Amino acid sequence: TGAGKSIILGAFSLILGERADTSVLINRNEKSIVEACFHTENNTAFSQLLREADLDIEPVTIIRREISTSGKSRAFINDTPVTLTQLNEITSSLVDLHRQFDNRAIEENSFLYQVIDAVAEIQAEVQAYQLQFRTYKQLMSDFRQKEEQYQTWKRESDYKQFLFDELQQASFSDNEIEEAELDVKKLEHGEQIRSVLQTTLYTMEEHEQAVNNEVRRIAQQLQNLSAVIAEAGAIGTRLESIYWELKDIIEEITSLQNNVDLDPERLAQLQERLNLGYRLQKKHNVQSTAGLQQIYRQLEQEMQEVSDAEDKLSALQKEIKEMEAALTAQALKLRNAREKTALIFAEKVNNSLKLVGMPNALLKIETEAVEELNHHGQDRISFLFDANKSGKYTLLQKAASGGELSRIMLCIKALTAKALALPTLIFDEVDSGISGEAARQVGLLLKELSTYHQVLCITHQPQVAGKGNRHFYVFKTTEEEKVNTRVRILNEDERIMTIAQMIGGERPSEIAIENAKELILKSDP
């Protein structure tokens, strides 16, 4: 007592991610460093956690906490910085620090399922169920997301359908609006166009001195001079070509004149189409027929997507119902197996409790069907406790005292040690308040646990200490007026003497020494 064992547990707590208290720092000028090494080469669950956190995986994992005097602390896993939350989550698969009033495993309902499933030997079935359940949850999430998206589309679809129908009814052909604009201009200026064309034709061909006739007359006169001056004949020939070019122009003007449309009804029709086109362009904020056609195609695609989404939702809903039925059948099998196992396991725990000094304590395990499927199946497991055979059962974590809860957890873990993968187990005075045969039974349970798992135990009981394979002695020294806590491994003789002192005091008798030898010899293989 008072040797400083709690300092060791405090160091473990820091490694496991608990917040640091700078008041415990001895040297206020230097940061404090706590470091732990774990052999994790074969710990697949831990390696998976490191992989998910994108951390290095090593055969030996080094976890370090650095606490500065300012109160700030840093955490590292294999020299990579991590947050305290990450540290706490990752180290949970490495160490189970089991103190009185610190039995989170009971409150974390998943542990109760792990215990019962391990004893029932249905872990493979549970894993298969949970794998399918994760798929089911993902499908449910996808369905909710798609349904929300569909409902949003549905709310907008009436208006989009109206826009789509409006554009479909308008049914503009390629460049129709641009071409209609030109046609309207022609129709609006038809009289002016025809008048200009008529005047042009009259001037070029019908007038007494028509341009075309005058050009030909001049050309003939110049050609007649070719015998006198060759250059004049050449000019006349060129004018003759112009005459024929003008003839072609006159024909084209005549054709234009004949094609000038003065139909007011066609003008009204074109103007109506233009007005429709302009209104739709303004509504959809585009500047061309091509822009409206693009909007039409986009609306058509969106309306098709709404239709497709409805079909996909129906198919997804059908798939979910089929999977839900399969999961429900699996969950029923799991619940039946758990119900059978719960009765048997509770009886075994109660028998163990009698051995560890709790003869009147009763544990009852209830499995209750629930409506909704969950990660564990379709049931709820509760550990209930009656400390004095009163017939009144209460939730274990509320009914049991710290010492009782520690011994109950020890019994549970000992009974499931072979079947259940557990991390390093650290027990802090799990034997508090008991002695004699009960303490011996606690030691036997711890010994059994250590066959399958690494177990560290802080104890004042020789019956418990005697079961250990290796003993660390915690003690205090005074050096330069400064008290230090030390830990050292005891050799064979020191083990015997220390346990003898636990039995008989500072100066143990020969009987105490022989008793200590017997405790150790019965423990060692």
Image: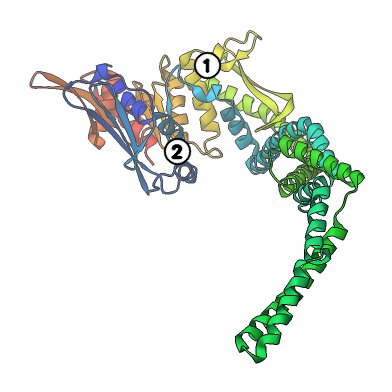
**Could you tell which of marks 1 and 2 lies nearer the N-terminus?**
1
- Hey, which residue is sitting farthest bottom in the picture? 227
Q: In this rendering, does residue 93 appear at all? A: yes
The tally of labels here is: 2
Q: Nearer the viewer, residue 37 or 210?
A: 210
Q: Nearer the viewer, residue 493 or 76?
A: 76
User: Where is residue 122, by image quadrant?
Assistant: top right
User: Where is residue 431, by image quadrant?
Assistant: top left
Rendered position, 512 above or below 216? above
Q: Nearer the viewer, residue 17 or 176?
A: 176
Element type at mark 2: loop
Q: Which residue is mark 2?
A: 453
Residue type at tag 1 = Met
Q: Residue at x 60, y 17 (%)?
A: 362
**Label 2 Cα neighbours within 10 Å, binned few <14 / some 14-19 / many ≥20:** some
- Residue 173, image x, y percentages: 81, 52
Residue type at tag 2 = His
Rendered position, 378 above or below 276? above
Disc marking residue 358: 1
- Residue 423, image x, y percentages: 45, 36
Q: In this rendering, does residue 322 appear at all? A: no
* 77 with respect to 171 (left or right): left
Q: Quadrant of the N terminus?
A: top left
